[in-house]
Image (cartoon, rainbow, N blue to C red):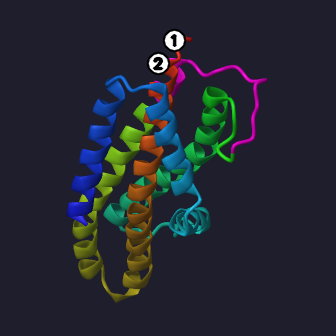
Amino acid sequence: MKKILFVTLLSLFGLTSISAQTKTAEELKAEREVLKAERKTDAYQERQKKIAELKDPGTTSISSIDALAANSATSLEEVRKNNVLIPELYKRTIGESIDGVTDVTVKKPTLQELLTVSEGIAKTLKSVTASTAEIAKAQGDVKSAGIMKAGKATKSINFSKDVNSLLLAELASQGKLINNLIATLKSSKNL
């Protein structure tokens, strides 16, 4: 799990530096086509379904486990919001939906709007990374909590594990797309 976190963080950092480099319009378009194809894969669709179905397990009266679950629930909600927002930003930036339907009636987002979303993705990734590090501590707290609280506490920890594993891949996907939109907006010279 730590290896996945490390690779994800590196890839997100790499994406930020890549977007700072200038790419041609053709390269950006080719990159968007790859990102659109990724969104149509079974793995992506399954991840979206799981993200939509996850439910907060509630409180356990063990503060460390409740804090972990609350952090995971907040991160999950941020990703859900981005899943609604990013396709709209895509449509406004590119002039078509992710499915390829042309729409020229909308105002392009500002660079600041896209950067704000990008910063939110980075903040959520940092939060997911921090909660992943807290899981081991929380598992120790389950053992010391006693048998009566162990079932609900284990359910809560499993919720956080599920959220973290799903969100790492989703945040990487969102980061790639928003960085492409930022580069596209910068290259269009319509700032």
Q: Is label 1 in a helix, a strand or a loop?
A: loop
Image quarter (top left, top right, bottom left or bottom right) of the N terminus:
bottom left
In the rendered view, does 12 fall on the left or right side of 37? left
Three-letter amino acid code of the residue under disc 1: Lys
- Residue 78 seen in the current view: no
The residue at the point 52 percent across, 35 percent down is: 29
- Residue 141 location (% of width, % of height): 26, 73
The residue at the point 27 percent across, 74 percent down is: 139
Q: Nearer the viewer, residue 149 or 189?
A: 189
The residue to which callout 1 is attached is 189
Three-letter amino acid code of the residue under disc 2: Lys
- Say few, some or many: other residues with alpha carbon within 10 Å of mark 1 (under 14 / 14 to 19 / 20 or more): few
The residue at the point 29 percent across, 52 percent down is: 8
Is residue 21 covered in magenta? no
The residue at the point 41 percent across, 32 percent down is: 119
Dominant secondary structure, magenta: loop
- Residue 114 location (% of width, % of height): 51, 27
As drawn, 106 above or below 153: above
Numbered badge on residue 186: 2
- Say few, some or many: other residues with alpha carbon within 10 Å of mark 2 (under 14 / 14 to 19 / 20 or more): some
Distance from disc 1 to disc 2, alpha carbons, whole Å, reads 6 Å
In the rendered view, does 91 fall on the left or right side of 26? right
Q: Nearer the viewer, residue 104 or 73?
A: 104
- Report if the CB atoms under discs 1 and 2 are less than 8 Å apart: yes
As drawn, 19 above or below 107: below
Is residue 111 covered in magenta? yes
Q: Is label 2 in a helix, a strand or a loop?
A: helix
Numbered badge on residue 118: none
- Residue 161 location (% of width, % of height): 37, 69
Q: Start and end of the magenta stretch?
A: 100-117
